[in-house]
Amino acid sequence: MYDSMRKTSYHILRVGLAITFLWIGILILKNPEAWSGYLQPWAAELLPIPINQAMMGTAILDIIIGAFLLVDFLPWLAALVGVIHLVMVLAVSGITDITVRDIGLLTATLALIIDSLPSSLTQRITFLRK
Amino acid sequence: MTALALLFTLSAIGISETVYLIKKRITAEKPVCPIGENCALVLTSHWSKIFIVPNDILGLLFYIVVSFIAGFLVIGVEPMLFWSFIFKLAVAFGTLLSLFFTYLQWRIIRAWCFWCLMSAFTIWLMASIILISNFI
């Protein structure tokens, strides 16, 4: 799978997603209260910590994912955490006007995992399939 | 806000470019050279370092500083005037240094390096955005 690392399309996708994660992280840090408005009431009630702290944590996670993707450090792991994060965002924010954008980001991040999986891991997956 | 979003995006692109060049230098691999075939000639010339520090490291530090300041300006970290001044000063310095490096490629080394030109255009675009946003 590491052959794909040389592909221009892979790097464009990686850097583009990195900038998206970083920028969203910065915007959440700027105004966590506004972003907490996207959370469904049932999800907010489940939080064990104040909603502002949860949003700050989300922002830091977004920035870490973005930084890892930007410098191409463990991109598959960063993308995997990004996918889990985006699935949770979709689950707790409900269907809104911007849901379609999150679905686009989710599929792009999923494509990045598949394209950047280390060969040792893909060999193991292939071995399990036999 | 729009200008800061663009400036942050450009600085992030700069980080990914310089990290790519640093990785290639450390692993002693030739970088992809889409325009011309002389990237390696430029990147291994004695102009590829300033005061012992490789230019890719200096570029990475520049882009990291600029992206952090863009982030501070968006979030509203005080003192905003100071960050804004440092930001403009850094981009102005980067613009002049990029002009010098482009001149070196054109007249002294007589070879073009795609990644160096891309970095130069990134910084010039940042300077243009700052100038335009000050007039609008």
Image: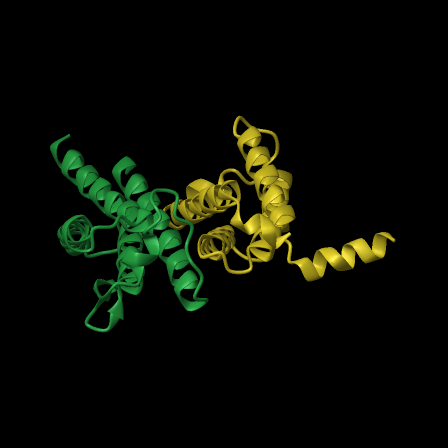
Chain colours: A yellow, B green
Q: Position of residue A30 (x, y in %)?
A: 36, 48
- The answer to whether any part of residue A33 appears in the image is yes
With respect to residue A40, does B20 lie above or below? below
* Residue at the outermost right position: A130
Do we see residue A40 in this rendering?
Answer: no
Where's the C terminus of chain B, which quadrant? top left
Residue A101: x and y in percent read 53, 32
Image-based side of B74 in relation to A10, left or right:
left
Relative vertical location of residue A85 with respect to residue A119 in this rendering, above or below: above
Looking at the rendering, which quadrant does residue A100 occupy?
top right
Q: Which residue is drawn at 85% across and 52% down?
A: A129
Left or right of residue A100, residue B5 in this image: left
Occupied quadrant, residue B53? bottom left
Picture coordinates of residue A49 (x, y %)? Answer: 55, 57
Where residue B82 sits in the image (x, y, percent)?
Answer: 15, 56
Q: Quadrant of the N terminus of chain B?
A: top left
Seen in the image, is B62 located left or right of residue A23? Answer: left
Q: As displayed, is residue B33 above or below residue B57?
A: above
- Name the residue rendered at 42%, 58% in the picture: B30
Observer-nearest of B133 and B96: B96
